[in-house]
Amino acid sequence: MKDWLVVSFIKLLSLLPLSVSRALGAFLGGLLWRGRGREKRVTITNLRLCFPELSEEEVHQLARESLQETMKTAMEAGAVWRRDYGWLKSKMVEIEGEEILRQKLAQGKGLLVLAPHHGNWEVVAPYLASIAPLTAMYQPLKSAAMDELVLKGRSKLNITMAPTNRKGVMMLLKALQQGTIVGILPDQVPEKDAAGGVAPFFGQPALTIGLIHGLLQRTGCAVASVFAQRVPGGFKMVVLDADPAIYSEDELTSLTGMNASVEACVRRAPAQYQWEYKRFRRLPEGYPKHYQKRG
């Protein structure tokens, strides 16, 4: 019953004008800010770590805005999943750097796109799929009803979803070898048994996924970063070239370049990054531990 209500609510949200969804998200984000939940505490902790030059007042202002932006993304998701691409394309009011994508695709070695949890990342996949076939990883949700809704919404156009296992990795490799696009969320903390290493992110040690370095070494593909920045009337699609260090054969250098690429995106609109995610967890022994109850 609970899952049915959630799915019904998302379907209802998908019918709302974008301006109304955003107003609702801003309101809900304000409620998170006024509460004492984990999201507020983690957001403040992350911002203190990543922007030590900010005053406490500035940190709190940015944290409040960030929670509101995150809830706007949540309120917009239903429309992105359920409406057709014509509607979504009409909301892409500006595109910056698309020539970077096309030039890299023209090299014929495949294009790996870093799509961090920044802006509305649900918009990135349909945009990329409008340029070339896209393969992206997908981890099934626990709720069967929600999983069906989300998977269907993310599998439109030229999008193929790959499972988060060895089979999925082989699907990514094949897509790159065929010269198409692979999209990966680069800012997730890897599981304990997954490949990766510790690399700096905003000057802080962060456990970082090694999948992208492995794909680069095996395919010689090109890399770019893409995010959908929330702007009045819709979204600004921003394409940035990756930090050159990401192509290094040395894994730590490559991971550092990947995190630098994500950081370049985040600095364009800091409030629109998902700061409530515990990015600096699971660090090996000897590294500082964050997220104690504070803030």
Image: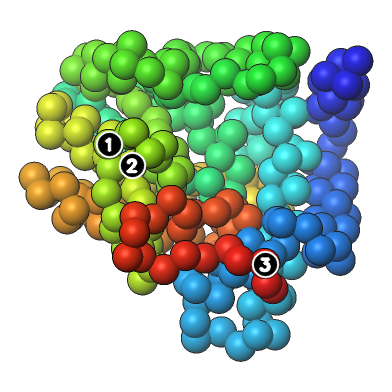
Mark 1, Cα crowd under 10 Å, few <14 / some 14-19 / many 20+, is some
Mark 3 falls on what kind of element? Answer: loop
The residue at the far front in this view is 285
Q: Quadrant of the C terminus?
A: bottom right
Q: Depth check: give the residue in front, 145 or 103.
A: 145
Q: Gap between marks 2 and 3, in whole Å?
A: 26 Å
Residue 133: in sight, yes or no?
no
Q: Depth check: give the residue in front, 106 or 2.
A: 2
The correct choice, above or below, for 92 with respect to 38 in the image is: above
Quarter assignment of residue 61: bottom right
Q: Name the residue under label 1.
A: 195
Instruction: Locate residue 35, reporting x and y percent.
Output: 85, 62
Q: Name the residue under label 2.
A: 209
Question: Is tag 2's residue or tag 1's residue first in the polypeptide sequence?
Answer: 1
Q: What residue type is disc 2 on? A: Ile
Q: Nearer the viewer, mark 2 or mark 1?
A: 1
Question: Is tag 2's residue or tag 3's residue first in the polypeptide sequence?
Answer: 2
Q: In this view, does 277 lie to the left or right of 227?
A: right
Q: Which of marks 1 and 3 is in front?
A: 3
Mark 1 falls on what kind of element? Answer: loop
Instruction: Locate residue 1, reporting x and y percent.
Output: 91, 15
Write the residue at 56% across / 14% down: 156
